[in-house]
Image: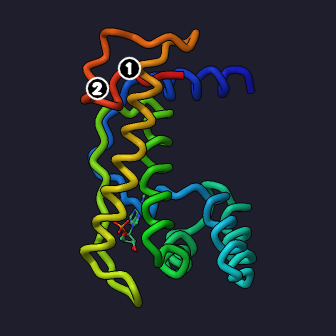
Amino acid sequence: MYAEDAALRFCRHLPKLELHAHLNGSIRPETLRSLAEAKGMSHLLAPLNAVAAKGNCCSLEECFMLFGIIHQLTTDFGTISAIASQVVLDFAEDNVVYLELRTSPKSREGMTKELYVKAVLDGIDHALGQLQLQQQKGSNGTVSSTSNGTSGFNGTSR
Ligand SMILES: CNc1ncnc2c1ncn2[C@@H]1O[C@H](COP(=O)(O)O)[C@@H](O)[C@H]1O
């Protein structure tokens, strides 16, 4: 157990390049559950919980079944923007220093493909702003004079 924890900490701390992360495949399970509750779609909780309970052992079919649910939950600008922000922050937390986040723009009622892209960019901007603030604040809360403010991912670590 201890060795596993140490290995996990070591892997988390390693600087990483993520070359192909799907936005919709990177959403936290608890975020999906919160969205289902907030949107009054509690019938989606059972399948979400069933897959989450299996951890990393669910089948490919079960994993891909989730995307149908995810697409029902990610239909508005605010949700897509918040998810994009959270995903970027989660990768930064894992010390991903370079991230290629991909997603297919989807048009739905009240959401054009252009708005979808804007929502994703809005979320990424928000996350980069947060990371920049974290960088500027030292561990004691002081502002660092060395930050150039452009690479929000550099230097993020646990
Ligand atoms: C390890 N993660 C993954 N592996 C394989 N396929 C994935 C995936 N995450 C998502 N998809 C597939 O790509 C479609 C578009 O999602 P994005 O708009 O790009 O986020 C999803 O509907 C799913 O079919």
Beta carbon of the mark 1 residue lies under 8 A of ligand 1: no
Rendered location of residue 146, percent (x, y): 30, 10
Q: Which residue is mark 2?
A: 149
Q: Position of residue 55 (x, y in %)?
A: 66, 56
Q: Foreground residue, 140 or 90?
A: 140
Q: Residue at x 45, y 50 (%)?
A: 85
Q: Is residue 88 left or right of residue 36?
A: left
Q: Residue furthest bottom?
A: 109
Q: In which quarter of the view is residue 132 placed?
A: top left
Mark 2 CB in 8 Å range of ligand 1?
no
Picture disc at residue 24: none
At x 54%, y 22%, the residue is 158
Q: Which residue is mark 1?
A: 155
Residue at the (45%, 36%) spot, across then down: 130
Residue 89, above or below 108: above
Horizontal side of residue 138 vs 129, given as left or right: right
Are there few (<14), some (14-19), or many (20+) residues within 10 Å of tag 1? Answer: some
Task: Name the element at disc 2.
Answer: loop
Crowd class of label 2 (few under 14; some 14 to 19; many from 20; radius 10 Å): few
Q: CA distance from mark 1 to mark 2?
A: 12 Å
In the image, what residue occupies the spot 50% across and 10% down? 142
Mark 1, secondary structure of its residue: loop
Query: Ligand 1 quadrant?
Result: bottom left
